[in-house]
Amino acid sequence: MTDESNEEKEATGGIIKQTIDSVTALTKAVPIYQDAVQPFAKETGKALGTVGKAVNVALAPISLVVWGYDKISDFLENKVAEKLEKVPEERISTPPPNVAGPAIEALKFTGHDETLQDLFANLIANSLDSKTVLEAHPAFVDIIKNISPDEGLILKLFVGVQQFPMVDVKLNLKKQGGFNILHRNFSEIGKLANCKHPQLTTNYLDNLCRLGLLGIPSGRRINNPKAYESLTSDPSIEQLKKQFENNEDLSIEFEQKYIEVTGMGRQFINACVIDKRARG
């Protein structure tokens, strides 16, 4: 039994390696720039004097993080192969070039970041699996290119959850009969996701909605009132309430709402966010 098991693993490993090799070959067809700052640009910068020199110094580290052929090949042969370790050999097949090709090219400028790198690894791995290849939509490459690492962390929150509560914090103008929005789409999502820059959470959510992965239904809220308690009692909100509690003309009010995953967002999460090894 042990010999047969080892032979099966070796056979599976051989198929995966063979297919990964064919994907790696795509990197030869994708222009890989070993130096992100081309010589002409460097010389032009130097000619601009002090500012030009400062620009050269600022751009120099970029050449260290831009991935070349060797790094991308290593990524495909190791990280992507690891994602496929639980996939039966008969399901491993050549991926659609309109998914794998652009994904490989995008790794030049995103491979240095672990969060984005992992999104691409899952996408490429799913495109190699005949069972999940349909989930690997070609548009997902551009979506990954258009999100920040923090936004990648936010999407992980939605793996097992469909929606999160949020509120608009309004300053009610009693005499004028109107209101000003003090905090738009206030939520705990940035903190829950351990974002590096949680203060940008509202902007992150705007971008994820723009990309069609998340949506905020107009005029709808979660039926359970307790869902909003942690938001309306947040220390920063409590401070605002105290500021206006004795003001006859102004008061703090909340518009309850929620943000949810769209159909396209769920497909993206399945193909790119959930670890391929967990799905098999």
Image: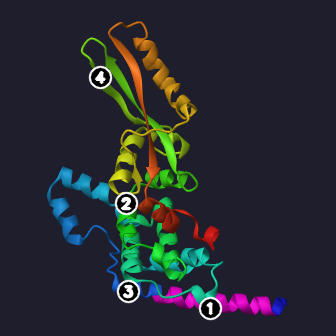
- Magenta-colored stretch includes residue 14: yes
Tell which of 30 and 172 is nearer to you: 172
- Residue at 56%, 74% (x, y): give it: 79
Magenta highlight range: 4-22
What's the distance in space between the residues labelled 3 and 2, CA to CA? Answer: 25 Å
Q: How crowded is mark 1: few (under 14 residues within 10 Å), some or many (20 or more)?
A: few
Q: Earlier in the sequence, mark 3 or mark 1?
A: 1
- Quadrant of the snapshot with the N terminus: bottom right
Residue type at tag 3: Lys
Rendered location of residue 245, percent (x, y)? 43, 10
Residue type at tag 4: Phe
Q: Which mark is residue 61?
A: 2
Task: Give the dominant element type of the magenta stretch: helix, strand or loop.
Answer: helix
Rendered location of residue 24, percent (x, y)? 46, 85
Q: Is residue 21 above or below residue 229?
A: below
Left or right of 147 on screen, residue 20: right
Residue type at tag 1: Gly
- Which residue is tagged 4? 179
Q: Earlier in the sequence, mark 3 or mark 4?
A: 3
- Quadrant of the snapshot with the C terminus: bottom right
Task: Find out whether the residues at labels 1 and 2 contact each other: C-beta distance under 8 Å.
Answer: no
What's the distance in space between the residues labelled 4 and 1, CA to CA? Answer: 66 Å
